[in-house]
Image (tube, rainbow, N blue to C red):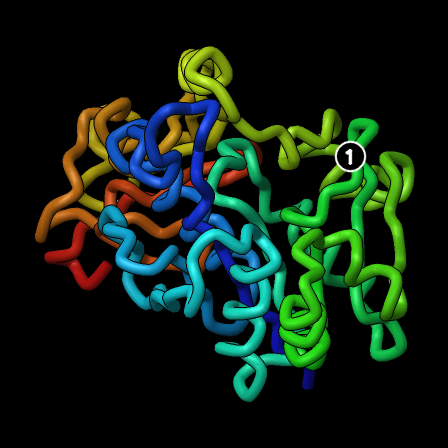
């Protein structure tokens, strides 16, 4: 059974942004919280966040671990090496992304990971006109290769692709997946934010459409009927239907994950059921 994990790189210098992207506010949490939580929703293995040496990180979702780069200033290759090495004995593969992908969708992550077969080392999307090495899938077994390349002075991710088996996925190949075609047809999963203008434009966009239902004692006044709303987080969805996540109310996301964490991000296509915790929900 193949296990897929996740790596989120948080240690970029953010020169054009002027401040660390990881801590930028995103609908009541942060960009890093969202990236880590969406990645965790998309994989069945552990998720690690790779930080620069001494970097202070904002709060992370429960269960997400932190790995520190051993060397500062070597760019994403160093973060990739550290992340893959941390997972090498716990997972076969990893989806690797940067912290600044505010529209990352689990459908995209799963599509990329499915293309990572035993005889392929890297699945490299070529989406929206660019190679996307920081929204790609890697076999954890290449951790040693990445470390070797770094030791030889190769700090660009493109060097990896010259030394291993790579499958590229273009826009059509990504959208050939029914879930991607329906839920992320413009491949906005790979849209990143590099400048304050990018961030403001992304932050000002309408949240995704999700379906919400209330059950049991929470369904008074017709609340049991499905309702489509726009909400970026579970907490915002609860507020939109007049609820507050507390010890009395829990949310079931897509019929399985039960949580009281209002900061957990939502994506297009999600469905939420709010239940009374007091009634065994």
Percent across and percent down for residue 186 are 73, 25
Which residue appears at 78% of the width and 34% of the height?
A: 181
Q: Is residue 66 left or right of residue 250?
A: right
Percent across and percent down for residue 250 are 23, 50
Label 1 Cα crowd, 10 Å radius (few <14 / some 14-19 / many 20+): some
Q: Is residue 261 left or right of residue 271?
A: left
Q: Which corner quadrant of the image does residue 66 belong to?
A: bottom left
Quarter of the figure that contains the N terminus = bottom right
Which residue appears at 35% of the width and 45% of the height?
A: 33
Query: Which residue sits furthest front?
Result: 153
Percent across and percent down for residue 203 are 41, 18
Quarter of the figure that contains the C terminus = bottom left
Which residue appears at 35% of the width and 35% of the height?
A: 20
- Foreground of the two, 232 or 204: 204
Which residue appears at 19% of the width and 63% of the height?
A: 280
Relative to 98, say whether 182 is above or below. Answer: above
Relative to 48, say whether 213 is above or below. Answer: above
Find numbered disc 1 in the image and state the secondary structure of the residue it sits on: helix
Q: Is residue 239 left or right of residue 108?
A: left
Q: Which corner quadrant of the image does residue 27 belong to?
A: top left
Percent across and percent down for residue 234 are 32, 38
Label count reads 1
Q: Is residue 70 left or right of residue 124?
A: left
The residue carrying mark 1 is 181
């Amino acid at each position: 059974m193949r296990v897929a994990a996740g790596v989120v790189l948080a240690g970029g210098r953010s020169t054009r942004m002027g401040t660390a992207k990881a801590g930028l506010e995103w609908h009541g949490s942060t960009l890093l919280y969202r990236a880590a939580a969406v990645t965790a929703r998309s994989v069945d293995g552990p998720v690690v966040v790779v930080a620069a040496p001494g970097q202070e990180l904002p709060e992370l979702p429960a269960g997400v671990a932190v790995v520190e780069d051993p060397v500062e200033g070597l760019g994403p290759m160093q973060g990739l090496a550290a992340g893959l090495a941390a997972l090498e004995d716990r997972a076969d593969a990893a989806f690797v992304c940067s912290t600044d992908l505010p529209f990352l969708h689990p459908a995209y992550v799963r599509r990329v990971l499915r293309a990572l077969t035993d005889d392929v080392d890297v699945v490299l999307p070529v989406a929206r006109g660019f190679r996307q090495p920081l929204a790609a899938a890697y076999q954890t077994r290449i951790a040693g290769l990445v470390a070797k390349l770094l030791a030889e002075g190769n700090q660009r991710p493109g060097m990896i692709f010259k030394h291993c088996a790579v499958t590229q996925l273009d826009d059509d190949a990504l959208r050939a997946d029914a879930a991607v075609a329906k839920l992320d047809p413009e491949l906005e999963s790979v849209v990143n934010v590099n400048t304050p203008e990018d961030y403001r434009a992304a932050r000002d966009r309408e949240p995704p459409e999700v379906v919400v239902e209330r059950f049991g004692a929470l369904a008074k006044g017709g609340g049991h009927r499905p309702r489509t709303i726009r909400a970026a987080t579970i907490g915002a969805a609860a507020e939109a239907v007049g609820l507050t996540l507390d010890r009395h109310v829990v949310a079931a996301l897509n019929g399985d994950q039960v949580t009281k964490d209002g900061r957990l991000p939502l994506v297009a296509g999600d469905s939420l059921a709010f239940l009374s915790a007091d009634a065994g929900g």
